[in-house]
Image (spheres, rainbow, N blue to C red):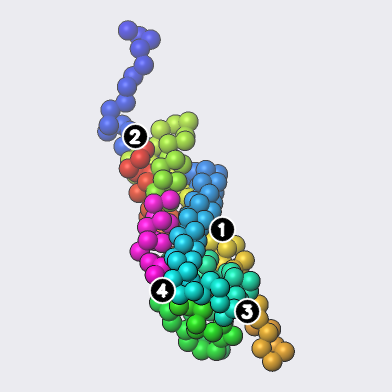
Amino acid sequence: MGGARHKKSPEENDSVPITEGLRPVGGAMYGGLAFIVSFIISTTYTFYHVDNYLQETDGFQSLAFTPLFDRYQEMFGWTYYNGLGIPITGPENTEINVLDQSMTGSSPIDSVFLAPFADVNQIVIVGIIAGTLFIAGGIVARRTAKPVPGVAGAVAGASTAIGYVSLLFVGAWLLRIEESEFGISVSFGPEIGFPLLIVGIFIAGFFGGLGGYVLND
């Protein structure tokens, strides 16, 4: 019948231009949400292991660990960035990796504060981030008025990098610790720069894009 709708063949669907998949608004929204959700889950996971460590060693009642909670709460968030391979940096070439229990250079943070983080697993943190971005990418690709199958769907999912990277930088700035040494103010926190940009784009683009490709029926 002349009024019947034409059903597109798989070949026609796959011919959708890649640029049709770009979703800057959806990518910003769900990419940002992916950061928030993955950060909350990751820090909750971190706190669980730290709390277990302190309970087992009676450290929770010890005054020695009080600063960990009232001054260095940012360290719980540092594990998120260390999980992505981003070091915690400070003046005089200081680098802190909470997950590896390593510290180089000069830091007012005593290495004893790294011990409670010993059981926090980097693979788990990366898995949380990857899984959240995968789902977010699929949602962005599916929430479109016009279907974007195949590679175009992957591009839609990869658009999550817009929101994810933006909040990744905001989070790195908020997680900095200001300390005073001999009257001089020094700052410690996730390294903000080109490596953070590349890591953010790669992980959001890859897993968000994969989600957009796989979950977009």
Secondary structure that dominates the magenta span: helix
Residue 3 in sight here: yes
The answer to which image quadrant residue 14 occupies is top left
> Looking at numbered disc 4 in the image, what kind of residue is underneath it?
Ala
Residue at 47 percent across and 34 percent down: it is 144
Instruction: Look at the numbered disc 1 and give the secondary structure of its residue.
Output: helix
Q: Which residues are magenta?
A: 116-132
> Looking at numbered disc 1 in the image, what kind of residue is underneath it?
Leu
Residue that lies at the very extreme toward the right in this rendered image: 183
**Residue 187 badge:** 3
Give the mark, 2 or 1, whose residue is nearer the N terminus.
Answer: 1
Residue at 48 percent across and 71 percent down: it is 54
Give the mark, 4 or 2, whose residue is nearer the N terminus.
Answer: 4
Coordinates of residue 67 in the picture (x, y in percent): 61, 76
Task: Tell me the distance, in whole angstroms, between the alpha carbons under discs 2 and 1.
Answer: 29 Å
**Residue 217 badge:** 2
Residue that lies at the very extreme toward the top in this rendered image: 1
